[in-house]
Amino acid sequence: MSEQPSIFDILGPIMIGPSSSHTAGASRIGYIARQLLNEKPVRAVITLYNSFAKTHKGHGTDRAIVGGILGFGPDDPRIRQSFEIGKEEGLEWEFKFVGDSARFHSNTAKIRLEGAGGGKVEITGASLGGGRIKIQEIEGFRVDFTASMHTLVVIADDIPGSIRNISGAIADRGSNIANMYVSRSEKLANMVIEVDQPIDKETLKKIESFPWVKFARRVEPMVDGSSRYEK
Amino acid sequence: MEFNYLSEIVEYCRREGKDMAQAMVDYEMKNKGLTREQVYEGLKRVLLVMEESVEQGMTQQVITPSGMLNNWAKTVAQASVNTLGPSLKMAAARAIAVGEVNACMGKIAAAPTAGSAGILPAVLVTMMEEHGTTRERLLDALLVTSAVGLIFAKNSSFAGSEAGCMGETGSAAAMGAAAIVYLLGGTEEQILEAVGFALKASMGLVCDPVGGLVEEPCTTRNAVGVANAFVSAQLALAGIKSLIPADEVIAATKEVGDLMSPRLKESGQGGLANTKTGREIQKRVFATVRAQKG
């Protein structure tokens, strides 16, 4: 049996208006970029494509993405003042606009973040409507996940046994892997692993401790009300 | 646990001796592994946001950044003329209130969508005001609306880009009509009749927002959608039958949505968006936005 919709998909999302695709979905993409950076962001370069580029002002897409980067969920009223709050918190940002790009979904944002500790991450995400999103690129790798489950993103040297070691680290903690996607480029492999239970700090530390792992980050599923990013 | 048609939900109710609200509690508990309390906690959050959004729009200053909407909810509520008594006027004002709050980046429950978010709060708050319905009962009414929405989402679409405004304010009016019938003691069959009436009245409604913003005509269509819900519920409770069964009406909305030109489905290229005045408003709104930026 395929996954059945929740009644709360019908009766929601609870969100800051005006548009589930151009506001709520946009904030989610920003929020995921923030989780992948995993530290306080100090600089953001945000490229909006297609419909996002053309209608961002009227829908507050720009404020929603900056709000997401600040850790505000789609239902957090602070999205409205995200520019003011961002300045106070020392975040600098720049928007770029690409009106027509056949390469991307109509509502797409690319976000490059730099953190206070020197970390960097770049993601591309699309807003699909109803507040649902999918992440399509991380650090130049093609990916495809919706962040509706606990998700682990790993970039590692493409060596034999890497997948086994990473999945083993997750299984050791009693978590079930629901889905796993692997893509390769040159000598690196990218793994996106969706897990039933939250990925705890110990699991993440263990994976990060493998010398061939370059990047390991978790993204928590977003539900209504999970507004503030936990530090 | 899977429901694909409203008739299946009615069948489940009959078999299990439950009403439609409890059928949906079973559905959510089984599919999502939640307790009854967790389901109701979620519903309470939705209802709270709905009530707050009505309250905000009815009391606070709401002028949208585009200037298209300017405290219309309060203007309607304070009107000295009543076409059919103050109840209808207030119900319409409440729907507009949520639309204005949404357009001003306020907090709403997109049930079923942001563009149609005014109809259910207006219906539920009006039931509370006019019939003294308790919040506990409103939570069950929300469950009934979710039954209608679930089946509509499966067999048609909420997306303006696929089913036009029929999929947004049309489905919301059908959900609202179901809630009213349920709250006034109608049978499961009568709930389905009301869904049929509301959707038939919305058949083929296009999505043509001026400037692509969720303001004109979305906000006033929400107000009219509330009237649709109350009239459809009235007919069903009187015992009139929708000659076309609700599940078949939903199937027809899918066919009609597919037949509608893409220009009439959230493209900004047809209907009101493409009128002389619509184009002028669009130009003015986006000029203002640019000026503010510079």
Image (cartoon, coloured by chain):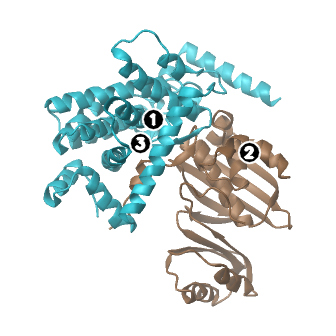
Chain colours: A brown, B cyan
Residue, disc 1: B116
Q: CA distance from mark 3 to mark 1?
A: 10 Å
Measured as percent of width and height from the top left, residue A43 is found at 83, 55
* The quarter of the displayed image where residue B158 is located: top left
Task: Tell which subunit mark 1 falls on.
Answer: B
**Amino acid carrying mark 1 in the image:** Ser
Residue at image coords 62%, 18%: B281
Residue at image coords 54%, 58%: A223
A216 w.r.t. B12: above or below: below
Do tag 1 and tag 2 residues touch (Cβ < 8 Å)?
Answer: no
Residue, disc 3: B158
A33 w.r.t. B188: above or below: below
A59 w.r.t. A82: above or below: above
Q: Earlier in the sequence, mark 3 or mark 1?
A: 1
Residue at image coords 52%, 33%: B55
Q: CA distance from mark 1 to mark 2?
A: 26 Å
Placement of the N terminus of chain A among the 4 image quadrants: bottom left
Residue, disc 2: A82
Task: Tell which subunit mark 2 falls on.
Answer: A
Q: Looking at this view, is B84 or A95 the one in front?
A: B84
Q: Looking at this view, is B18 or A45 the one in front?
A: B18
